[in-house]
Amino acid sequence: MNFSRRGFLGAAFASAATGFSACVADKSGAAKAGAGEPGGISTFDENLSIIFSDAHVCGEEARAARFTPKRLAAFVDEVLAMRPLPKRVIHLGDLAYLHGHPADYVVSKPLLKRLEDAGIELVFCMGNHDRRSEFAKVWPGRLEKSPVPGKYVSVTSLGTADLVILDGLQGTDDRPLTDMGPGNGLLTPDQFAWFKKDFPKRKRPFFVASHFPAEDFKTSDKKHGHLGRWLIKNAPMCVGYLYGHIHRWRPEWIHGAWNERKSLRTLSVPSNGFWGDIGYVKMRTTADRAVCSLELKDFFFPSEPEDPNDRPAPWKLKIAETRGATCTFLYDREGA
């Protein structure tokens, strides 16, 4: 497929300009949004979230990854076709290609802005390939709303539970433009102090999400080391941990200690289109649990083959075995 930057940007901005009507509320308080079709009106599902991650949108840095914007565009189209619409879309980091270049965010914004124009809440997280300063220029006003100055930290309702986004990107905005950023996350003392003040005492179920695996997300608490172990020991209403970074669907359990029953379920979500498992996740919350389902569209490594039929047998088998997989998080951790 020929995919010029000028042609792509023109189409993307045209799509954003002709987007969807603003969200309004009916007399019952149910949110409504224009569906993008004549006379099409759709409500939002408060308990439905879409999880994107690792879009790695390539602006003009490398021709080899110019397929990434069209992948993200296709997934945005799928989300906008859902009825009812999801209340929110969460992106778990590495929106930028490799180095956090400005063009990566410029190219990706009109795609994701279509979601926002439809009334869908957008929640962002920083990945190791991102650069806060460049993201902030393209998406202004978001950093100022963070409860931790200078970090992309947020708390979002998922319907029957909450989602806490932590910013594990180490302070690398001054790194060289060829530096891909450190692969491990760091929970800085200011974030840790904010988190410890409130969330261990919460009675409402909540998830923690970051770009980085919990085992690779270090804290300033020397006793417990990584974030996952600290959550197991100190946050009984934390019912799950979500992350990106490794580009594959991987539900797991992490444990506090060998001789203890306490554990925490974690889920790695796929990439939106760079390499590995290609797709996104639907997350639905209910009274006592949240169920994540995998929308797997493809698998490739290290880059997308030009021929759609050019997939080795092991790739096809992986797709067939993984597609439609689910991961359930119970709100009652002690009774699990």
Image (cartoon, rainbow, N blue to C red):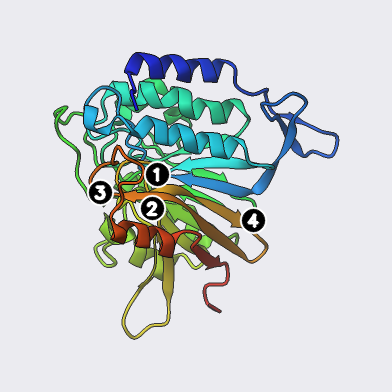
Labels 1, 3: front one: 3
2 or 3: tag closer to the N-terminus: 2
Distance of mark 1 from mark 3, alpha carbons? 17 Å
2 or 4: tag closer to the N-terminus: 4
Q: Which residue is mark 4?
A: 160
What mark, if any, has residue 53 been given in the picture? 1
Where's residue 264, x and y in %?
Answer: 43, 69
Q: Residue furthest bottom?
A: 259
Q: Residue at x 62, y 57 (%)?
A: 285
Answer with the quarter of the image where residue 219 lies: bottom left
What amino acid is at disc 2?
Tyr
In what element is the residue under mark 3? loop
Where's residue 180, x and y in %?
Answer: 19, 37
Q: Residue at x 49, y 42 (%)?
A: 90
Q: Which residue is mark 2?
A: 243
Labels 2, 4: front one: 2
Say if mark 1 contacts mark 3, CB within 8 Å.
no
- The vertical placement of 194 against 224, above or below, is above
Left or right placement of residue 303 versus residue 136 in this view: left
Badge 2 local density, few (<14 within 10 Å), some, or many (20+)?
many
Q: Which residue is mark 3?
A: 301
Visible residue check, residue 136: no
Say if mark 2 contacts mark 1, CB within 8 Å.
yes
Q: Residue at x 55, y 39 (%)?
A: 78
What amino acid is at disc 1?
Ser
Distance of mark 2 from mark 3, alpha carbons? 20 Å
Distance of mark 4 from mark 1, alpha carbons? 23 Å
Where's residue 107, x and y in %?
Answer: 37, 23
2 or 1: tag closer to the N-terminus: 1
Answer with the quarter of the image where residue 71 lies: top left
